[in-house]
Image (spheres, helix red, strand yellow):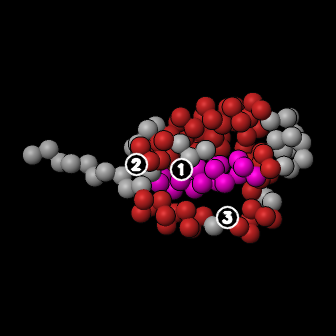
């Protein structure tokens, strides 16, 4: 789910379409096919890295847009099913033992540096 917004500076709100697609494929409860499966294992790291990037505003997109985008995903009832699904994924012991947000923060903060705004002379 790492979109072009992180590396190319596109509007991070583009993630909403990806979330809507994922959400539209989910059953009303549970994981992608009811019980946890490799489909969920495939989605988890991309979603988790997107959360870290957006909540820490890491990317070359306009400053502040990452946090604002994640705030919409967290608060808009339209994304409630995805939010529950993602929280269920993050609550798994396997995820908690293997995902280290500080590694993503360290890497992305060096890799995706927002261009400095040039002062007009």
Report the disc number at residue 39. Answer: none
> Which secondary structure lies at badge 1?
helix
Q: Earlier in the sequence, mark 3 or mark 1?
A: 1
Q: Residue furthest right?
A: 35
Mark 2 Cα within 10 Å, few/some/many (few <14, many 20+)? many
In-image side of 73 versus 53 (left or right): right
Q: Is residue 50 magenta?
A: yes
Please state the horizontal and vertical placement of residue 112, each as a whole percent of the image. Answer: 42, 55
Residue assigned mark 2 = 60
In-image side of 58 versus 97 (left or right): left
Q: Which residues are magenta?
A: 41-58
Residue assigned mark 1 = 54
Q: Which residue: 74% across, 62% down? A: 95
Tell me the quarter of the picture where residue 84 sits.
Answer: top right
Q: Are marks 1 and 2 in contact (CB under 8 Å)?
A: no
Q: Which residue: 46% across, 37% down? A: 11
Instruction: Return the residue nearer the eye: 35 or 91.
Output: 35
CA distance for labels 3 and 1: 16 Å
Instruction: Return the residue nearer the eye: 119 or 105.
Output: 105
Q: Are marks 3 and 1 in contact (CB under 8 Å)?
A: no
Tell me the quarter of the picture where residue 8 sits.
Answer: top left
Residue assigned mark 3 = 99
Q: Which residue: 43% across, 38% down? A: 10
Count of picture labels: 3
Q: Earlier in the sequence, mark 2 or mark 3?
A: 2
Q: Which residue: 48% across, 52% down? A: 57
Please state the horizontal and vertical placement of residue 115, each as a whole percent of the image. Answer: 31, 51
């Amino acid at each position: 789910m790492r979109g072009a917004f992180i590396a190319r500076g596109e509007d991070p709100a583009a993630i909403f379409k990806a979330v809507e697609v994922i959400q539209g494929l989910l059953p009303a409860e549970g994981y992608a096919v009811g019980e946890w499966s490799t489909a969920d294992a495939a989605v988890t790291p991309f979603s988790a890295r997107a959360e870290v990037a957006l909540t820490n505003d890491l990317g070359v997109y306009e400053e502040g847009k990452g946090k604002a985008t994640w705030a919409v995903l967290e608060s808009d009832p339209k994304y409630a099913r995805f939010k529950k699904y993602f929280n269920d994924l993050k609550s798994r012991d396997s995820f908690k033992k293997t995902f280290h947000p500080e590694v993503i923060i360290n890497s992305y903060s060096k890799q995706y540096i927002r261009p400095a705004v040039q002062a007009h002379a």
